Image (cartoon, coloured by chain):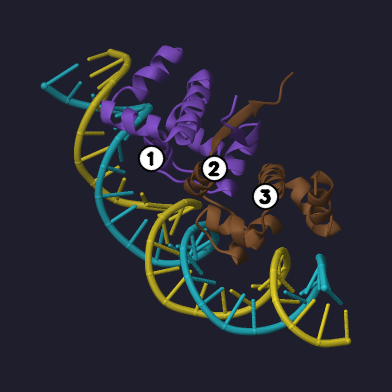
Chain colours: A purple, B brown, C yellow, D cyan
Amino acid sequence: MEWKEAKKIINRDPEVLRELKNLEPEYQIIKQLISLRIEKKITQKEFAVLIGDSQPNISRLESGNYNPTLAKLKKMSDCLDRKLEIRFISKTR
Amino acid sequence: MEWKEAKKIINRDPEVLRELKNLEPEYQIIKQLISLRIEKKITQKEFAVLIGDSQPNISRLESGNYNPTLAKLKKMSDCLDRKLEIRFISKTR
DNA sequence: TGACATTATATCATATATGATATATAGAAT
DNA sequence: ATTCTATATATCATATATGATATAATGTCA
């Protein structure tokens, strides 16, 4: 399995995708998390255990129906042995 | 006023700074937001109006005693005409 | 120093995130 | 088709974020 699979999951529902793209940072996060999970070849349940959460909550997260706090994002990144980077980037060129 | 001033504000309380550095993403955010405000040469009150919030809440935000949701971060970035970027960065080299 | 501006702290009601569990639905394997 | 696994959806109690207001403390300037 590869990114193709992740893309398939993201594309499952065109409506959700449209909304996700409008809410771009959320999309970024979801995309990254799904990629990570698939990269590791693990189920949502296993991923949930990894970050100290539950499978239904991972599903909700991946679906975009989720609004995590900064602390939650940090916890997730720590559990995934990743460094969380948050930036407010200037739109000017 | 320049970054020196922002630094002074961040350094006001060594204990807070120590904790902030430990909670690094939060520190990043605060640093960026304070920089932005000082760059614009506006008070917390004016900044608050800019992002649709109140001065006491900005103070709380700048002090680190704040745990914003993703939606809140997005709203802030939108109001500041910035693009919010969130990444889980691999720690490997 | 005093007046005013700015920032920090406290408090509170309401909204919503977190964490947990049950169950429905979809997918995979045989 | 059946069984099992994986994912999606629903629900709920509790914790906590949001948004708002009042006030205290600190800073600035004449």
Q: Earlier in the sequence, mark 2 or mark 3?
A: 3
Residue depth check, mark 3 versus mark 1: number of the one nearer the observer: 3
Could you tell me which chain the residue with mark 1 belongs to?
A
- Is residue A82 shown left or right of residue D10? right
Residue drawn at 50 percent across, 56 percent down: B52
Question: How dense is the environment of label 3, judged by Cα within 10 Å: few (below 14), some, or many (20 and up)?
Answer: some
Q: Are marks 3 and 1 on the same chain?
A: no
Name the mark on residue B37. 3
For mark 1, give the secondary structure.
helix
In this rendering, the answer to whether B60 lies above or below A24 is below
Kindly identify the amino acid type of the residue bearing the numbered disc 2: Ser
For the question of whether residue A19 can be seen, the reply is yes
The answer to which of B90 and D28 lies nearer the viewer is D28
Residue drawn at 64 percent across, 57 percent down: B61
In this rendering, the answer to whether B86 lies above or below C28 is below
Report the quarter where the C terminus of chain B lies.
top right
In this rendering, the answer to whether A81 lies above or below C7 is above
Kindly identify the amino acid type of the residue bearing the numbered disc 1: Arg
- Is residue C24 shown left or right of residue B9? left
Judging by the rendered image, the residue that carries numbered circle 2 is B77
Could you tell me which chain the residue with mark 3 belongs to?
B
Kindly identify the amino acid type of the residue bearing the numbered disc 3: Arg
